[in-house]
Amino acid sequence: MEQPSTETDRLILRPFTLADATDVHRLVGDWDIASTTLYIPHPYEYWMAEEWTGVRQGQFESGKEVNFAINLKSNGALVGGISLDINQTDEHGELGYYIGKPYWNNGYATEATQAVIKYGFEVLGLQRVFAAHFVRNQASGRVMQKAGMTYEGCLRQHVKKWDAFEDMMYYGIIHED
């Protein structure tokens, strides 16, 4: 089964393909993107983007995650990515996203987040969606708040990114919200 696409007023959220590897490499390879996301290394090599885009469909088919390329309706440009890591047993999904630096401060992250939360509840049947951000990345927290998520707490020195422990702020939303 192929992953479906979804749309918002300004965005098309669609499955990643191997053809996206060049744009993924360009956007994710930026130091500012890698430094504020937990699992993106730096430097981010082209082969990493190629490998990553190549396994997305399999992850969807296994029910483990859904990943969307975020494209502008106006010109088709790939501006970022957004995902839900799915826990089927507990019926929740962990949201993760990035927007390429040239596209910051346009509301794309909030718009995509709202659409993926809706997708999680209405299509995947999830009970809860949650997300976390490094304390130093307050812009990501504002996205979560604008998308209707509620602050749930801070886990001090919860993860290690590049030899430094990071505090993580958690937000969540349940289906009834």
Image (cartoon, rainbow, N blue to C red):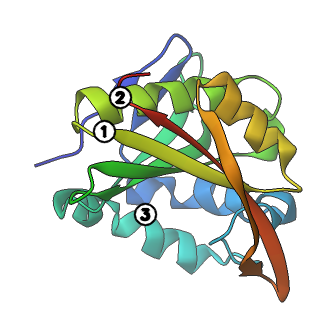
Marks 1 & 3, CB-CB < 8 Å contact: no
Residue underneath mark 2: 175
Q: What element carries label 3?
A: helix
Q: Nearer the viewer, residue 5 or 47?
A: 5
CA–CA distance in space, label 1 to label 2? 5 Å
Sooner in the amino-acid sequence: mark 1 or mark 3: 3
State the image coordinates of residue 98 (x, y, percent, origin top left): 66, 48
Using residue 154 as the reference point, say whether residue 87 is left or right of it: left
- The image shows residue 101 at horizontal and vertical percentages of 81, 45
Q: Position of residue 16 (x, y in %)?
A: 40, 50
Answer few, some or many: residues within 10 Å of disc 1's Cα (few below 14, many 20 plus, some between 14 and 19). some
Q: Mark 1 or 2 closer to N-term?
A: 1
> Quadrant of residue 163 in the image?
bottom right
Q: Which amino acid does label 2 sit on?
A: His
What number is the disc on residue 53?
Answer: 3
Q: Who's the residue at 21% across and 60% down the image?
A: 89
| Residue at point 36%, 23% (across, down) | 176
Secondary element under disc 1, as helix, strand or loop, is loop
Lower sequence index among marks 3 and 2: 3
